[in-house]
Amino acid sequence: MNVRIKAVLEFTVAGSALEDAMAEYDELSVSGLIQEILDKAIACEEIEVKVIEGPNTLEEYDQVQAGG
C-alpha cells in the first residue's frame, strides 16, 4: 500500500555547507538536493519539492549575499 506524506520543512544552513552538499550530490538547486537526499534515504522516485522562501540555487544565494 502506498502512503502519501505531505510535510513542511524549514531549516537554516551555512552557505558553505549548502555549497558542499550541492557539490557532493551534484545538484544545481536546493529542491533537487532535497529530492536526491529523500530518494537515497527511502528509495522514493516521486518526490515533489518546492522552495517557497529563500534561495533555490547558488546564484540566488550569491545575490542574497551581495545584497545583504
Image (cartoon, rainbow, N blue to C red):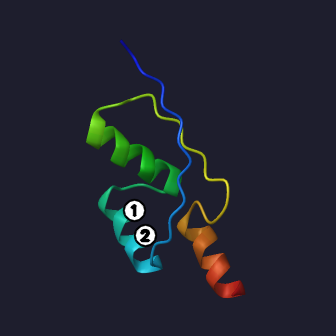
Task: Name the foreground residue: 33 vs 10.
Answer: 10
What is the three-letter code of the residue carrying label 2?
A: Leu
Please state which of the two labelled residues, at mark 2 or mark 1, is closer to the viewer. Answer: 2
Q: Nearer the viewer, residue 60 or 45?
A: 45
Would residue 29 be seen by someone viewing this image from the given angle? no
Label 1 SS: helix
Please give the label number shown on residue 22.
1
Q: Residue 18, labelled with which disc?
A: 2
CA gap, disc 2 to disc 1?
A: 6 Å
Answer with the quarter of the image where residue 39 lies: top left
Determine the residue positioned at 50% across, 71% down.
12
Q: Residue at x 30, y 62 (%)?
A: 24
Question: As shown in the figure, which amino acid type bears the numbered disc 1?
Answer: Met
The residue positioned farthest toward the right in the image shown? 67
- The answer to whether 58 appears left or right of 34 in the picture is right
User: Could you say where residue 2 lies in the image, as x and y percent from the top left?
Assistant: 39, 16
Classify mark 1: residues with Cα within 10 Å, few (<14), some (14-19) or many (20+).
some
Q: Using the image, determine if residue 41 lies above or below residue 23.
A: above
Q: Residue 14: where, in percent of width, then height?
A: 45, 78
Residue drawn at 67 percent across, 54 percent down? 52
Q: Residue 14's mark?
A: none
Question: If the image is split into quadrants, where does the C terminus sit?
Answer: bottom right
Marks 2 and 1 close (CB-CB < 8 Å): yes
